[in-house]
Image: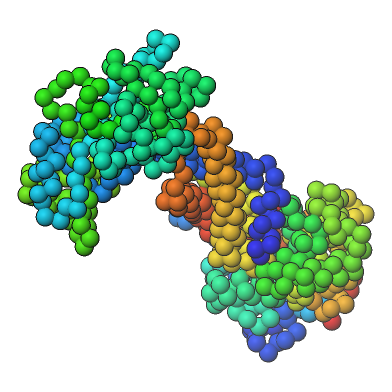
């Protein structure tokens, strides 16, 4: 049923993109302190699509934020690509995210005044890539996702599925090794959601990337190599999916 | 990311236009009111600038140029006796009544200049010959006088009218700077001015003086004051003394200052609030940018670029509109309007301040923004 993680965190375990151990996180202080993560262990391998599921308030999104280096854990250790994310300074974390992580949000968070191709190019523009080169690269990624005809469309002119594909293109344009997806199908109809997750799955497999998907959507469980069930701030169960990671 | 910042700014058309309108209005109001204020101050000095003399000598308790404190005729010679004086001439200045041929009366500012040198005459003659002031009954009248006394068809070279029942004849039309009181200027010789004005023991209004080569007007004014006890001022000193008196003794400074302050506050309030709203409404997008890897410094630079871009455009449009007002509504000297570079620099600084404060409010919000908000649905 469940895969055993290594007993210690190890820089040399290059197979693991994400190594989280004993992650504890609480919000608030004193009597209002609410523990959200209560010692979570999690590992994600290269080419693995991991689904993080569980009821609302179980700590999925908080864990995703800690892995992304957006939230600081109170205890525990998180290594991404062998780098201890908790030891990085704020600016180093920002650069680390830019260089190695891709984000896909439930609400897409596309910039409404930018066209599809400009939105997809944003990570490259943040990196300081020249506008012409960034747009060319974004156009290529969008084209590979079947969005070649919608490059100049503003987000308001795109369907939910198209917006999510632009968001995926934005996440992929700088060729990250780990994709962090927060409820990517929550606002999509079943067929579109299925197609989007299929694309995420293929992206993970083809390029040896790790993909973590936080979801409530049981219809996409078939795409997970492992399905990690969280309950009350802990990993409750790890279930093998239909495919095994590399 | 400059490209992204500018697209965010220009793409949100309603907020961009609101910001632009606020900053444009603010700039226009400050420039327009500032220019009218300075125009009024310029008019207030016209009694000095129209005469164009390096040093003005008068009673030591004088407050401003229109406050005439008559001097004894001997004062001219007293001034001439001071070392460093190249020349010193008398000047008559006073408000008199002109009676037109149709029987109407008009207040005029009569200026009597020394007949042999005509020192104190206006700089520009529009028609006629100022030298003819030496001929009997001759006066020169300014463009406002022509307008006030009946227009060019009634007032032209050769036209006669009366000053205090003394017939005078127009021999020249001259151009002058309008006065604060808005009275037309009528020039004649000093001797004729004394003749057409009511009898008084003392009629000498000012002594105009010039320093010899190597002595500055400031130095000459200082010497005259020290040696004679009279009030002696350079053109600049007398101009500023007049401005200070007006600011201290009228509500003009407070009125214009209040309007300018209002323009500043309105600009600050509109742009600050709109910019803040602009930031708040884009918080999820800014959060996403932070999550993706944009630093707070980068977002701050984006905000500053947006703010100063719209500020520059607002400044340009605002100054343009104020200038247009100056050229149309206030054109031809109808209204006091003087747009000066120090005013434009001051407004630019004020606008920079508005943009900076607006930006700082937004940047503070962004600095505290946790990118984790983007994971909260």
Residue B314 in percent (x, y) is at: 58, 47
Rendered residue at 84%/57% (across/down): A152
Image-based side of B136 in relation to B294, left or right: left
Q: How many marks?
A: 0
Say whether residue A201 is visible.
Answer: no
> Would residue B304 be found to the left or right of residue A100 on screen?
left
Q: Residue at x 22, y 50 (%)?
A: B210
Task: State the residue in front, B177 or A130.
Answer: B177
Vertical order, A77 against B303 (above or below): below
Asked if residue B92 can be seen in this view, the reply is yes
Residue furthest top in the image = B103
Percent coordinates x, y for residue A59 in the rendering: 66, 59
Instruction: Give percent across and percent down for residue A189.
Output: 88, 50
Q: How is the image coloured?
A: rainbow
Identify the residue at image location x=11%, y=43%.
B77
In the picture provided, is B114 more to the left or to the right than A113?
Answer: left
Residue B277 relative to residue B82: left or right: right
Quadrant for the N terminus of chain A in the image: bottom right
The one of B203 and B39 positioned closer to us in this rendering: B203
Residue B137 quadrant: top left
Tell me if residue A157 comes above or below residue B270 in the rendering. below
Residue located at (69% from left, 60% from top):
B4
Q: Which residue is situated farthest in the bottom direction here?
A: A12
Position in image of residue B199 (x %, y %): 16, 20
Which image quadrant: the C terminus of chain A?
Answer: bottom right
């Amino acid at each position: 049923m469940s895969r055993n993680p290594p007993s210690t965190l190890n820089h040399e375990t290059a197979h693991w993109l994400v190594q989280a151990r004993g992650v504890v996180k609480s919000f608030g202080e004193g009597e209002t302190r609410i523990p959200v993560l209560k010692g979570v262990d999690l590992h994600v391998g290269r080419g693995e699509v991991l689904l993080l599921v569980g009821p609302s308030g179980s700590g999925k999104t908080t864990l995703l934020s800690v892995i992304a280096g957006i939230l600081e854990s109170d205890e525990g250790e998180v290594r991404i690509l062998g780098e201890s994310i908790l030891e990085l300074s704020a600016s180093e974390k920002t650069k680390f995210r830019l260089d190695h992580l891709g984000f896909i949000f439930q609400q897409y968070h596309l910039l409404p005044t930018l066209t599809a191709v400009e939105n997809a190019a944003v990570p490259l523009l943040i990196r300081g890539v020249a506008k012409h080169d960034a747009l060319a690269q974004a156009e290529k990624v969008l084209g590979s996702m079947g969005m070649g005809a919608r490059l100049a469309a503003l987000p308001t002119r795109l369907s939910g599925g198209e917006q999510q594909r632009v968001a995926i293109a934005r996440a992929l344009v700088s060729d990250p090794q780990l994709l962090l997806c927060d409820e990517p199908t929550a606002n999509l109809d079943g067929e579109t959601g299925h197609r989007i997750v299929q694309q995420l799955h293929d992206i993970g497999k083809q390029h040896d990337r790790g993909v973590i998907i936080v979801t409530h959507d049981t219809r996409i469980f078939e795409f997970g190599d492992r399905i990690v069930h969280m309950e009350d701030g802990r990993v409750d169960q790890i279930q093998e999916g239909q495919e095994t990671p590399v | 990311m400059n490209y992204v910042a500018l697209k965010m700014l220009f793409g949100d058309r309603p907020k961009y236009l609101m910001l632009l309108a606020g900053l444009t209005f603010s700039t226009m109001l400050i420039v327009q009111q500032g220019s009218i204020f300075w125009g009024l101050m310029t008019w207030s000095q016209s009694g000095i600038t129209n005469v164009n003399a390096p040093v003005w000598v008068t009673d030591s308790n004088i407050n401003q140029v229109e406050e005439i404190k008559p001097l004894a005729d001997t004062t001219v010679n007293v001034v001439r006796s001071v070392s460093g004086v190249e020349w010193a001439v008398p000047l008559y200045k006073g408000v008199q009544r002109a009676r037109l041929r149709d029987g109407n009366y008009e207040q005029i500012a009569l200026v009597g200049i020394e007949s042999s040198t005509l020192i104190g005459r206006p700089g520009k003659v529009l028609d006629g010959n100022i030298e003819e002031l030496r001929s009997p009954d001759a006066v020169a009248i300014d463009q406002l006088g022509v307008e006030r006394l009946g227009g060019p068809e009634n007032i032209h070279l050769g036209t006669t009218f009366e000053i205090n029942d003394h017939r005078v004849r127009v021999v020249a039309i001259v151009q002058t700077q309008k006065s604060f009181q808005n009275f037309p200027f009528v020039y004649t010789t000093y001797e004729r001015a004394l003749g057409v004005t009511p009898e008084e023991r003392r009629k000498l209004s000012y002594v105009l003086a010039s320093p010899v080569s190597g002595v500055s007007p400031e130095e000459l004014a200082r010497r005259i004051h020290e040696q004679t006890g009279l009030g002696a001022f350079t053109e600049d000193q007398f101009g500023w003394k007049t401005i200070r008196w007006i600011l201290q003794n009228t509500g003009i400074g407070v009125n214009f200052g209040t309007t300018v302050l209002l323009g500043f506050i309105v600009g600050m309030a509109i742009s600050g609030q709109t910019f803040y709203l602009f930031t708040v409404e884009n918080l999820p997008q800014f959060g996403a940018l932070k999550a993706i890897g944009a630093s707070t410094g980068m977002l701050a630079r984006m905000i500053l670029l947006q703010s100063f871009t719209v500020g520059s455009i607002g400044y340009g449009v605002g100054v343009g509109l104020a200038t247009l007002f100056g050229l149309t509504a206030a054109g031809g000297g109808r209204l006091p309007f003087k747009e000066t570079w120090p005013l434009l620099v001051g407004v630019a600084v004020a606008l920079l301040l508005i943009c900076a404060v607006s930006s700082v409010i937004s940047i503070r919000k962004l600095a505290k923004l946790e990118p984790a908000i983007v994971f909260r649905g």
